[in-house]
Amino acid sequence: MVRHILRALPVLLFVATAAHAQTPGPSSDPAPDATTPPGTPPTTTPSPPPDAPVPPPAAVAVPPEPTAPPSPPPVAAPVAPPSKPKSPPVSVTGYLQAVYENQTDTNDDGAVPPDSFSLKRIRVRLKSDINSWLGFTIMFEVAGAQSPLRDGFLSFKLPHHELKVGQQKTQFGYENPLSSTKLFTVNRALVSDTLGRGSDLRDIGLGVFGTWKLPPDFEAGYAVTFVNGAGANRKEDTELKNVWGRAGVTYAPKDLGITSALGVSFARGDQLDPGSLPMDPADDFDARFHRLGVDVEVEAKWVFAAFEYIRGTTDTGGGAEADSQGWYVLAAGKTPWHVGPVFKIDQLDPDMDAADDSRLRYTFGAYADIGKAFRVLGNYELDRSDKRKDDTMLLFVQLVY
């Protein structure tokens, strides 16, 4: 800064001197002298030469303003790996059923099996909806010596319909299609275990299910299964395919608080009969059968009741046929505490032309539901068949998970 001031100082002095020299003062022209003769021209003093142009002051250097350092190049964001398609969720559910059984020698044959605990069923079910129209269900049996696979089918959902392809329950009557977790008695009716199904409650084939809402307060539906007829986990072993089906209507008026249902069932097909010598295939034959059934259910606030009747014919070999029939009536009381009494009577006549082969059983008991997962059943089965069997007491517990 001082250096710049010293350089500008001579210029400033020169400018100041020039300004002082141009300042007007008293006139330098002499007044006319009286002694000057007239006509003498006045004496003039020459003007000083014009001032030389003043050079501009030297420019003061201004230091440059600091500049921001250059920004670093942008760092590219990491590229995420391509996402894998999400697998549809698979629900895992099932149930466990354990039973204590004690028989009493009521037929006076002197033979009573020991009382026992057993695992009636342990089921594990895998179910998933792959999309809005396709799903699958797989269910295994863990307890017992039966084949582990119980259900294994694909489910195709259509308007008002569902198609099931694979191993599934055959559809006939009310009690058999119902899950065992919803039964009010430990055992199904005698007629359900014989005339209401094939050699097994499940078979391999195609199932077609349809439902429609009908005004007012009505619903109609049907269920038909076309199966091999050989039973679960087995290939076809006869000429014909078996058909099991039910069609029904439900009426549930909201103002009455009562739901009633009526169903009609039909079945036809054949099964391999081992003949009189089960170990000798030489006397095996195809036993063709026909079945017809009707069922009625009524549920109100304080009671549930069901009735089912089945009749059919079955080849017995040599061109002979056996006419069979059976029925049951069930009543269960309902309370706000989910506890109630149960009564059931069921009868089966495997050959209406034969004597002393009819079976008759009364079941007395109660049920208790603790939450939605735990159920307890107590049943006493009183046998009054033509050929008496021992009465049986059953205590049953169930856990749904």
Image (tube, helix red, strand yellow):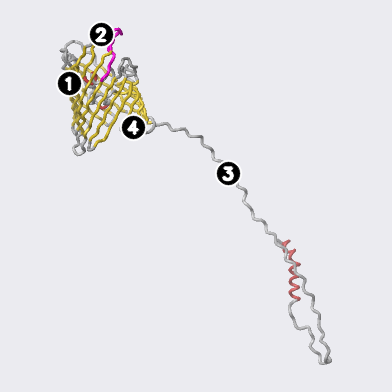
Read off the magenta span. Answer: 268-285
Q: Earlier in the sequence, mark 1 or mark 3?
A: 3
Do we see residue 180 in this rendering?
Answer: no
Q: Earlier in the sequence, mark 2 or mark 1?
A: 2
Where residue 214 sits, quadrant-wise, is: top left
Amino acid type, mark 3: Pro
Query: Residue 69, image x and y in percent?
Result: 62, 49
Amino acid type, mark 4: Leu
Q: Residue at x 32, y 33 (%)?
A: 159
Q: Which residue is mark 2?
A: 276
Query: Residue 373, image x and y in percent?
Result: 29, 29
Q: Earlier in the sequence, mark 4 or mark 3?
A: 3
* Of the pair 397 and 382, the residue shown nearer to us: 382
Is residue 280 magenta-colored? yes
Q: Are marks 2 and 1 in contact (CB under 8 Å)?
A: no
Amino acid type, mark 2: Ser
Query: Residue 200, image x and y in percent?
Result: 29, 19
Q: Which residue is mark 4?
A: 158
Q: Measure the alpha-carbon separation of dots 1 and 3.
A: 86 Å
